[in-house]
Image (cartoon, helix red, strand yellow):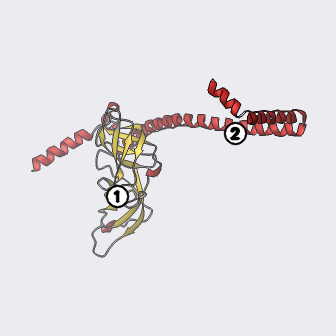
Amino acid sequence: MERLLNFIYEYRAFLTFLLLEILCAWLIIENNQYQSSKYFNSSNQVAARLLGFSQGVREYVALRSINEDLANENAHLRNELQRALIELTEGTTDSLRVNQFEFVSAKVLANATQHYKNFITINKGGADGLAPGMAVVGDGGAVGKVKSVSNHFAVVISLLNVDEQVSGSIKRSNHFGTVRWDGVNMRYSTLQFIPRHAHPIVGDTIITSGYNAVFPQGIPIGYIREATLKPEAPFWDIRIELAQDFGRLAFVEVIKSKLLAEKDSLQLRTIGEIK
């Protein structure tokens, strides 16, 4: 209290001047129509801007919840679409085969794109049924594969990782090869081992081949932007633009394959018998 009184006493002249200025301004506004209207117009503008900012904050918070709801709904629709596609293309009613893929929505918590070996962290884990080896897709196309999980989180090895590769095929011709990032540009990757007789065309769509039980067939991977063939070379040099823009990745869907363990077990047993 003593400090406050000392402050008021020390600055008494300035405080008196400030009080008189406020009083004069009030008298002018109160007794002059023009100044009064200007004051209230200015006050309304400030209040409107503050209200607009407050509303924007509320809408942003609500938008996050809406985005999560939309991501969950999208995962549900993908499940239904995948079942319908399997029934249509394979002509099967085997419930396990029809329902072999399940899409689980997850939020991206961290997403590296600037390294040679990039990883993504998501907010779903073992408690949600996730396991290493599961495929991950985004709103544009293939994203990567689950590398490791804890109870509530998972780390995904991104397609922007020089150690990651996925089987891809040219949608138009079904010729398949391997998509592997060269570590140069986050928007582009390479398609390897396409034979010289395949005749790829710039603009061709590259999709997952379905030759493994990780990715369902038909998930977009990218689009051919360059295709060159060196003399006597057995394979084309193909550069593709990735379908998924990793710079704007916010939500992903993890694909749980119910037949993956059976397929892997059979392959390992067969390879063991051959050896």
Task: Identify residue for label 2.
Answer: 49
Q: CA distance from mark 1 to mark 2?
A: 47 Å
Q: Position of residue 88 (x, y in %)?
A: 39, 43
Instruction: Give the number of marks.
Output: 2
Dot 1 lies on which element? loop
Task: Identify residue for label 1.
Answer: 181
Dot 2 lies on which element? helix
Examine the image and state in which quarter residue 231 appears: bottom left
Left/right of residue 57 with respect to residue 25 in the rendered view? left
**Is residue 92 in view?**
no
Residue type at mark 2 is Arg
For disc 2, the neighbor class at 10 Å (few under 14, some 14 to 19, many from 20) is few
Examine the image and state in which quarter residue 257 appears: top left
Query: 154 or 77, which is in the foreground?
Result: 154
Q: Residue at x 63, y 35 (%)?
A: 54
Q: Position of residue 31 (x, y in %)?
A: 90, 33
Examine the image and state in which quarter residue 90 appears: top left
Query: 198 or 157, which is in the foreground?
Result: 157
Q: Is residue 80 above or below residue 237?
A: above
The quarter of the image holding the N terminus is: top right
